[in-house]
Amino acid sequence: MITAIGQSTQPITSNTLEKSIRDFPEHAESGTCPDSASTDQTPLAFDSRAARPCAAKIPNPEFSLPDWRQSLRDAVTDPRELLALVGLSQLADRLPDNDAGFPLKVPRGFVARMRQGDPHDPLLLQVLPQLTELNDAQGFVDDAVGDLAALAGHGVLHKYAGRALLIAAGSCAVNCRYCFRRHFPYAEELAASHAWREAVACLAADTSIREVILSGGDPLVLSTQKLTELTEALRTTPHIDRLRIHSRLPVVLPERIDDAFLAWLSGLPLQRVVVIHANHPDELDASVGAACTRLREAGATLLNQSVLLRGVNDDDAALAELSERLFAFGVLPYYLHQLDRVRGTAHFEVPDVRARELVGMLRARLPGYLVPRLVREVPGERAKRPL
Ligand code: SF4
């Protein structure tokens, strides 16, 4: 049997609650926590001594950001380099010979949040190619959520009433190994590739659509200029009054939320919703908190969606802390998705019975608004299915 890096016969539990946030950019300023007796000025968004989040420690957003395009270009793409960066070079001989057509990509700022020398690190396991991805697993297919059947036009998915989704970009800042679109034919189906014309014509023809969802890939890898072209084109569709952006960049590349982007976002004549994507509390350092603050100041409602992943966040303490930190950053936990059964991801699957048990544990320890909805996407259904 192939053994994956990070898998063992011992149950993997989260020991993250005592972990402080590392490698916060030196140029970021720390706030202070008025309800803490400590005078410690360490720029933490999470008070590890009190084992609770501290909203007041969200840093002042007024600092100069690194150039996000440069950060994107500098992403780690060599699995051996990634292992060396986290002190695990000895595991290089357990890497797969090929990346199953889905190469490693991870920004260095995200790597800096990983624990040194820990093959079970929940951030590392989300991005490192594994030998187990090459195993065939029954029921795991290329298009697990029926995206291709839902295409309503070039790069436009229409699954649910009143909403249409644009496949705005064909790449991401990070390649998540569990991704439900890891086999999506982006080369053929990209709304942005024809200057938005076909996609916008499709939206204009259906006056029942009130909300446009930008997805991908990740729409925020597009330049702000490209996003502006889209929203200019949408001016011809007065029935659309809401723009929802699904993006992992506020978490993995928070410098993307720069002044030009915020000027675009705050100037939109539409309601704005940004759905970020964090799976584990260790992803949420102070730089992410600052990005969330900037998004809220630009008028965005912030929600989070997570994917339940074996060995990463199938632990009630980790999920509870994720909700607490999200709320400290002004983000509501929205969905906890059961894994989409995409080829190459079977090792991440958590049984439904365990998923329900975890959500029951969250209900027992959190206020209701911090308990995400446990759902599964079922191809052909007109809404996510609650579990
Ligand atoms: S950011 Fe989203 S779309 Fe991109 S690889 Fe990760 S899960 Fe997939």
Image (cartoon, rainbow, N blue to C red):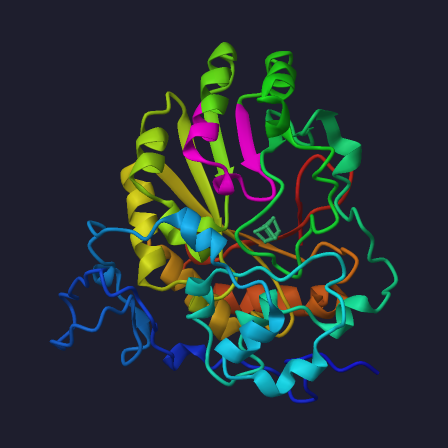
- Seen in the picture, residue 240 relative to 249 is either above or below; the reply is above
Residue 119 position within the rendered picture, expressed as x and y whole percent measured from the top left: 58, 82
* Residue depicted at x 42% and y 51%: 70
Direction from residue 82 to residue 333 in the image, left or right: left
Q: Nearer the viewer, residue 177 or 163?
A: 177
- Seen in the picture, residue 136 relative to 200 is either above or below; the reply is below
Q: Nearer the viewer, residue 82 or 291?
A: 82
Residue 289 position within the rendered picture, expressed as x and y whole percent measured from the top left: 32, 56
Membership of 217 in magenta stretch: yes
Highlighted magenta segment, given as a residue range? 211-228
Image quadrant where residue 100 sits: bottom right
Image quadrant where residue 259 sits: top left
Direction from residue 60 to residue 360 in the image, left or right: right
State the quadrant of the N terminus.
bottom right
Residue 176 position within the rendered picture, expressed as x and y whole percent measured from the top left: 61, 59
Membership of 326 in magenta stretch: no
Number of labels in the image equals: 0
* Residue depicted at x 56% and y 64%: 359
The answer to whether residue 7 shows anywhere in this view is: no
- Seen in the picture, residue 355 relative to 239 is either above or below; the reply is below
Residue 240 position within the rendered picture, expressed as x and y whole percent measured from the top left: 50, 19
The answer to whether residue 106 shows anywhere in this view is: yes
- Seen in the picture, residue 232 relative to 42 is either above or below; the reply is above
* Residue depicted at x 65% and y 71%: 310
Q: Nearer the viewer, residue 344 or 186?
A: 186
State the quadrant of the C terminus.
bottom right
* Residue depicted at x 33% and y 42%: 295
